[in-house]
Image (spheres, rainbow, N blue to C red):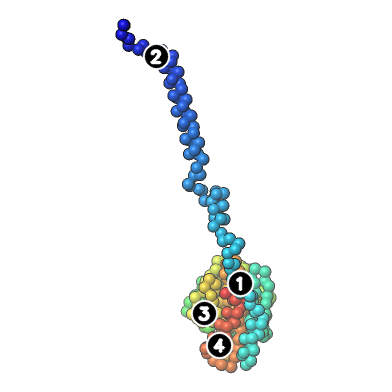
Amino acid sequence: MTKPGPRPAAPTHRRKTLLVWAAAALLLAAVVILGGIRSVPPTHRDFLSSDFRTAAHQQAPSPSAAAPAPASPAVDLAAEIQRIIGEHPDHRIGVAVMDTRDGQLQSYGDVAPYTAASTAKVLTAAAYYHLVETGDKSLDTPLGAFNAAFQLKAMINTSSDDSWLLLMQDIGYPNLTAYAATLGITYDPEKNLIAPPDMARLLTQLATGKLLNADHTAELLGYMQHTNDEDLIPAALAPGITVHHKYGVVLGYVHDAALLSAGDRSYAVVIYTWGPNDADSADRLDLIHDLTHQVTGALFGQ
């Protein structure tokens, strides 16, 4: 019996065929694996992608969730001011509010002219700056021991009466009256009488840049912040309300004239009062603060 010899090698073409089939199988497996990987959602999402917005939307409370508490009813400002007036029958009380965006005026109480006290210093300041802009005056003009620029700041920021007198004399009383008239304001420097609505008109024109150029407007408003007396309107404001103001106190008169702003809302708010009690009494401060709370509650919801 003949012993079997070694098995002959597979033909070359057969090996090639097997290699081709193996490569095809590997390629098919790779396609299946890649397809599975690509079908899994990516873990990273751009924050502007629709997937992100959808997820954020899905996190919102469902309609069955408890609804937020309803907002407090709007302040009936006229009724509240009338209430305060009724609680102070021996006082004169006048309030003027003007929206600086559209010039809409609201007046409450006794808004006939009052002795304006130092609130009229804003008018004197505006008149002097106006003369500087027309070339008739200079901030470097010597006035008293200092120059006009110093006196303007002292008159507004620390309410210096000496500075006020120097500036009014340099302007000239007739010129100051004439300037006020161009603004639609009735003012006699000798009597120092201004009605609350006229003061609101002055502040609104200042705030909107209708009185002075941008630099002088910013300078004057800067002097009306952080003054030497913040006990009236500023002391009663809620956080977030910006105030520029000029107070006035003399012989039973206690006034504050302010520009108040929060967000995109801005108002001129003028509170004039007269009473028989001492001007700096706690009762008068409470009166001003109560009026401020009611006004800002109506205007800003605060």
Between residues 231 and 239, which one lies in front from this camera angle?
239
Q: Nearer the viewer, mark 1 or mark 4?
A: 1
Number of marks drawn: 4
Q: Crowdedness of circle 1 by 10 Å Cα count: few (<14), some, many (20+)?
A: few
Residue 155 is at least partly visible in this image: no
Q: Nearer the viewer, mark 4 or mark 2?
A: 2
Q: Earlier in the sequence, mark 4 or mark 3?
A: 3
SS type, badge 4: helix
Residue under circle 1?
A: 71
SS type, badge 3: helix
SS type, badge 1: loop
Label disc, if present, on residue 235 of the rendered structure? 3
- Quadrant including the N terminus: top left
Q: Are marks 4 and 3 in contact (CB under 8 Å)?
A: no
Residues at marks 2 and 1, CA–CA distance in whole angstroms = 91 Å
Q: Nearer the viewer, mark 3 or mark 1?
A: 1
Residue under circle 4?
A: 284
Q: Which residue is pictured at 59% across the width and 67% down the height?
A: 67
Q: Which residue is pictured at 35% across the width and 12% down the height?
A: 7
Residue type of the residue flagged with mark 2: Ala
Residue type of the residue flagged with mark 1: Ala
Looking at the rendering, which quadrant does residue 126 occupy?
Answer: bottom right
Residue type of the residue flagged with mark 3: Ala
Residue type of the residue flagged with mark 4: Arg
Residues at marks 3 and 1, CA–CA distance in whole angstroms = 25 Å
Q: Earlier in the sequence, mark 2 or mark 1?
A: 2
Q: Nearer the viewer, mark 2 or mark 1?
A: 2
Residue under circle 2?
A: 10
SS type, badge 2: loop
Q: What x and y, as percent, mark residue 71? A: 61, 72
